[in-house]
Amino acid sequence: MTTRKGTQYGGLDESKDSNLGTSVATNDTGETTNTDDTTFTGGNDSDLIDLNQTFRTTELPEETEMPNKLNFGDAMRAIPSFGGGSESLLTSYFNRCEFVLEHVDEKIKLMILDAIVSQLTDKASDAVRYREITSWEELKAHLTTIFGKTHSVQFLQKQFNQIKQYEKESIQQYADRVETISHELTTALTLNKTTAEAKIISETIQTQTLAIVIAGIQYDIRLILKATKVPNFEEAVFLAVEEEKLNEKIEYKTDNRNKYVKKSNDKSKIQCHRCSKYGHYSNECRTSEHKITSFKNQTENKNFKSSANQVKVCHYCKKENHVISECRKRIYNEKKKKRAG
């Protein structure tokens, strides 16, 4: 076996066997060591695998480009839902929505925006229920205002003092909004306060909450709450909800009664016994007596003419061509009875 001298590493001379193609190292004592992980026992150059040739001849798969745009179905499935929560959840929600909006065609962005709004739930849905959202920036700004960083005390106090019940908002929904702002304001004002100070602040805001929920509620229920003088927020909400249910029942009955009255006012088949015309009762008849008499005479004349064409039959003697008032036999018999009497 012949060896050739190689590069020297730290006292070792690396040589390569011309037959086996393995690297060996000769140390200072003249001993040779195999430096490869795999030991070959015999063979020639034709048995070895040329890795360079293998990589040159092997065709690697072509890289496929990911599509730049999402179709409508994929975009709809990628839209997340959001019901409110911490600022971190809000940020994550924004990132996912913006990813979808950036990867859809410009033509369907408004449809995707409508879909994003429809996926809002709970408090987030309530926050946009009565707002018309026309752009992603508008929706993002509105949700950030409500669920973003903690608002300043001045901002919360302004919202608290100006809150009103919406036109189509139920009493319970309105009360929930008032209570949410009340809790946020209490938290902001009691931050870094002592227990005694926090208690006083909390009681003060509770009193204000009762006054504010009454001031912003619909007018008819506001009058009832003021007259009742409810002692706290919970009782005010309970009474207002019960009154709302009662009003709904009254409105339902009124609607049904109006439908019945409308139906009963149909007089097209009613006949007046005074003038014999249709469309009104006899006590509502406006036909004059002269017209009624004329109408009756016309009716009698018609009956007379129709009866004149019929054959007369006497009901006394049962003979034809005369009636009982003209019957001579009847007249004769009556005179005979008078003379006999």
Image (tube, rainbow, N blue to C red):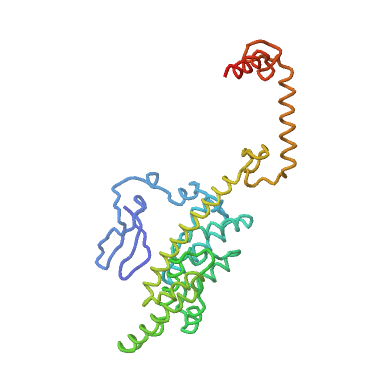
Of 168 and 53, nearer the camera is 168
- Location of the C terminus by quadrant is top right
**Residue at image x 68%, y 11%?**
320
**Residue at image x 49%, y 84%?**
154
- The count of marks equals 0
Q: Tell me if residue 216 comes above or below residue 295 in the rendering.
A: below
Residue 145 is situated, as x and y percent measured from the top left of the image, at: 51, 74
Q: Tell me if residue 228 comes above or below residue 23 in the rendering.
A: below
Relative side of 44 to 326, left or right: left
Of 272 and 187, nearer the camera is 272
Q: Quadrant of residue 340?
A: top right
**Residue at image x 31%, y 57%?**
36
Relative side of 11 to 150, left or right: left
Answer whether residue 187 is visible to the viewer in this image. Answer: no
Answer whether residue 302 is visible to the viewer in this image. Answer: yes
Of all residues, the one furthest to the top in this rendering is 319
Residue 301 is situated, as x and y percent measured from the top left of the image, at: 74, 28
Residue 161 is situated, as x and y percent measured from the top left of the image, at: 49, 80
Of 62 and 168, nearer the camera is 168
Relative side of 268 to 182, left or right: right
Residue 262 is situated, as x and y percent measured from the top left of the image, at: 58, 48
